[in-house]
Image (cartoon, rainbow, N blue to C red):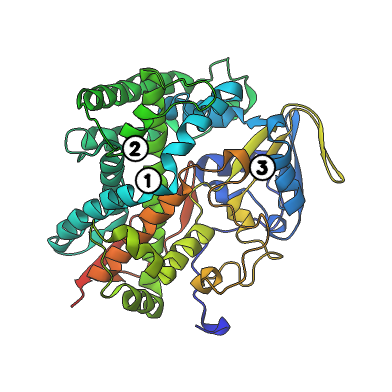
Amino acid sequence: MTEMSLYTPELPARPATELPFADFLRAVRTNALGMWPQAAYEQDVLERRMPGRTQFLLNAPDAIHHVLVSNPGNYRRSRASVRILRPITGNGLLLSEGEEWRHQRRTIVPTLVPRMIPMLCGHIAGAAQAGIARLAEQPGPVDLLAEMQFLALEIAGRSMFSMQTDAYGSEMRAQMQRFAMRNAQPHLLDMLLPVWMPSPRDFGRALFRRRWMGLMARIVAARIEAVHEGAPRDLFDALMAARDPETGTAFSRTELRDQVATMILAGHETTATTLFWSLTLLAAVPEEQQRVAEEVQGVDLSPAGAADSLKHLARTRAVVSEALRLYPPAFVIVREAIGADRCGDLVIPAGSVVMISPWVLHRHRRLWPSPDSFDPRRFLPDAPPPPRFAYLPFGAGPRICVGAQFAMAEATLVLARMIQAFQIERTDKRPVLPVAIVTTQPDHPPGFRLQRRH
């Protein structure tokens, strides 16, 4: 591809100037990608006055490093984030704070070390193999968003519990869909009220939490009964055996439930959308899809060969990395300043809202050439690395996603298996626009045509 022929996907409209407060709130609730004006993609800092506080959007690498790496203890998750995510993740690694978070991280990190990847790749490949067989039997247009959600949930079930999701999958999908439709949209009071004071939406979230955590508890109980001795078969075995290296403490059953809930949410929805956007981009650029097809031809993507195949999938991995740049599932990181702070010349008052948006960073005019265009060459092994703190699909600092390596392996292997099996085309030309509420989703599920490769 030459610079002149790069494919640039359609984008939601960007306001020319800062939105009035009412329009800003409407964007937060309907599509948060529309809340940042054009200046956000060109400046180092964007400051906005909110009721009773100041909001900062940080794009400067030094400021981002300060908040996420140098002084993360001064920045806690925002009130709205806690209200929205607590019902579906409990008090797992995503939302825990202080010593409880340090205990959880110390205990979990050893379960996701590189030596676990071959075992997990076997689960990924087994689920992908079954998913390919299912897709090959489907006549007519295919809803790849739904299919990737189904497959990602199946991978989560096998990787976490060594079992297919037949017994719980439909209930899990229904509850996740209910959460997204009814409980995930933020409200002004979610942002303004203290976390301990319920907002009107919190009553519905509390009902959802009882149902969801009840399901998680049933799954954990069933898995605990499947006694196993020897090497871990899956992530749950590893979590059961894990001990805090400082205290020797194991996870309680409630802690196991919350970690499982967190991993299912983080590992299912984000990977599904990453795969959807990767496939959508390849369908739009047939010559890039052909390059991936040539790379994966003859590569052993079976459960036995999947782990070893990763080193042969540089182009496929570059496509996934570029999809994560253009459509980061976690489109914004929001923190609240506990105390007053200074980032260089920028003074951050206590109580301020600090936002670091991968969506904005990944499209910033000063950080990327052709920032809105699809160009996987940016991530090939011989390409220069992205600018410091310009690429944050998994966050940064102590709170960086502990499952990033597994997530990249999963998306790369599934994408490789899909392109190895099918030539993928769109059935229509209607633009697919990203919509961000909790994750970066498409505005509608487009149809795809899958033609078997020979």
Residue 330 is left or right of residue 213, and the answer is right
Mark sitting earlier along the chain (3/2) = 2
Residue mark closest to the camera, 1 vs 2: 1
Residue kind at label 3, given as amino acid type: Met
The answer for how far apart the CA atoms under marks 3 and 1 are is 34 Å
At label 3, counting other C-alpha atoms closer than 10 Å, the crowd grade (few under 14, some 14-19, many 20 or more) is many
Marks 1 & 2, CB-CB < 8 Å contact = yes
To which residue does mark 2 refer?
235
Residue 138, x across and y down, in percent? 14, 60
Q: Quadrant of the rendered structure where residue 336 is? A: top right
Residue at 68 percent across and 47 percent down: it is 19
Q: Residue 249 carries which label?
A: none
To which residue does mark 1 refer?
116
Residue 226, x across and y down, in percent? 20, 27
Secondary structure under tag 3 reads strand
Secondary structure under tag 2 reads helix
To which residue does mark 3 refer?
355
